[in-house]
Image (tube, grey):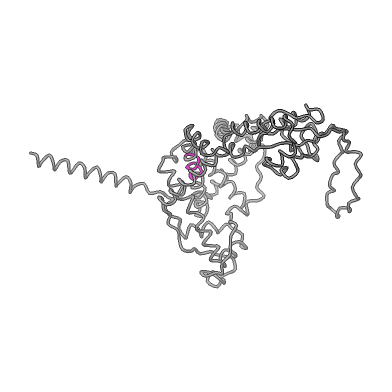
Amino acid sequence: MKSFTKLILTIAVAASLATTQSCAFFFKSEFVEIKAEELSALVEALPDNQKRQLAQNKAMRDQFITQFKTPFALAQAAEAEGLHKTDEFKQEMAFRTDQTLAGEYNRRNPDAIVSKEESDAYFNAHKAQFDSFFTLITRNAKQAPSDSDKEMMHEQWSQIQVLAEKGRQAGIEKEAGVQVQLKIGKASLLANAYSKSVSDKMVMTPEEKKRYVSEHPEADVDKIKEKAQALLTRVKNGEDFATIAKEFNEDDTKTTGGEMPWFDKEGKVGGSPVIDEPYVQAAFALEKGGVSEVVKSRVGFHVVKLDDKRIYDPSKEPKPAATPAPLPGAQPTPTPTPEGPQEQVRTRHIFLSTMLADTFEEQETQAKVKRVMEDATLKYPVKLPTDFTINVAGYNPSTLPGLGGGSGGTMKGIDPNANK
């Protein structure tokens, strides 16, 4: 009886393992490999000059091939986490498909125009679909989009949808080159989804932040403020402001004793706004020779001293020398209208940067994300071809110089949509 029970258990375990292996075998990611014929189909849409350049340079083709390794590996990692099953990814992929089909149709039919009637008709028949799309792409917006933004977006969306439908009707979606574009686009979306998923998980915990700051006092914003306060006390006790600035400043003003350029109440220097508002407010609140309390800007802590004030009238500045007449047909450069008289101040500051304190969390998170991504590229291998065929109009690929050999070279990246 015992032997019979043992046999039943053995069979059950074996069946379980077989089922698991069967499921694993059944799901084979499309991103485990990119084939030579897929790359040949992909580059078919490139202009002849780009195809010729690629065909003549083996090193360039090698680089073209290897660019798919990382996104394909990360796409597999995303699938392992089930990210390809989320509604968000499905929506993004649907729109990426429409964009690809619309772009390909437009490339082949450059004179194709979507009339306002067509666009409006499509939108009116698919409002719910647009609302879902609009919610998706604005989900992370820092401020709510305006009605005009939404109006412009719905017009663009409708035009893409109309062109994509025309592309489907023309059978473009089934072509090998377009299928590869869609595969690459899908890999890119999945890789981005995986990167975001990892980033969300790698955010530093309060304990990790506390430990980092304890090990890096220069990242402790409270200690930086205390140091700025101590330097202000030294100024109030009679020490020379410029001397302290030369010793402690953590920007380019260190060599000039903290000197800053003239600026107005909008923080403009030479017409461009470059001074933070808290600094501007502190400076204009001072009398000549006065010193502010510690001021926090986007970049750090400041102690501000007002050296001088003036009323500046840019219209009284000497006119620049006459410029040469524009070439025939060229649009003349408009001459800016001088602003009227404005109050300006000249200051100097003692400055301590909070850059590390403000960025260490992001930097540490990015470092952890990078390690996880590198591990994923090792865990999920991608099979790449050693080479692929390129057909160039008017040429026999076998006679092209450098095919299969090449003399080296670099590639900035070849975009399959470059001529769309």
Please tell me whether residue 328 belongs to the stretch shown in magenta: no
Q: Is residue 126 visible?
A: no
Q: Seen in the image, is 388 located left or right of residue 99?
A: left
Which picture quadrant has residue 130? top right
Q: Position of residue 374 (x, y in %)?
A: 46, 49
Closer-to-camera residue (302/131): 302
Q: Is residue 195 magenta?
A: yes
Q: Is residue 299 left or right of residue 28?
A: right
Residue for point 72% across, 32% down: 235
Q: Which residues are magenta?
A: 190-197
Instruction: Give the total number of marks visible in the rendering.
Output: 0
Q: How far across and down, in percent of the image, does residue 401 sit?
A: 57, 72
Q: Is residue 208 toward the left or the right of residue 240 in the image?
A: left
Residue 393 or residue 197, whichever sits in front: 197
Q: Say whether residue 304 is visible.
A: yes
Q: Which residue is drawn at the image coordinates 43% and 47% (left, top)?
A: 76
64 in relation to 74, above or below: below
View extreme (left): residue:
1
Residue 270's quadrant in the figure? top right
Residue 291, horizontal then vertical, whole percent: 75, 30
- Position in image of residue 400 (x %, y %): 56, 71
- The dominant secondary structure in magenta is helix
Quarter of image, res 273: top right
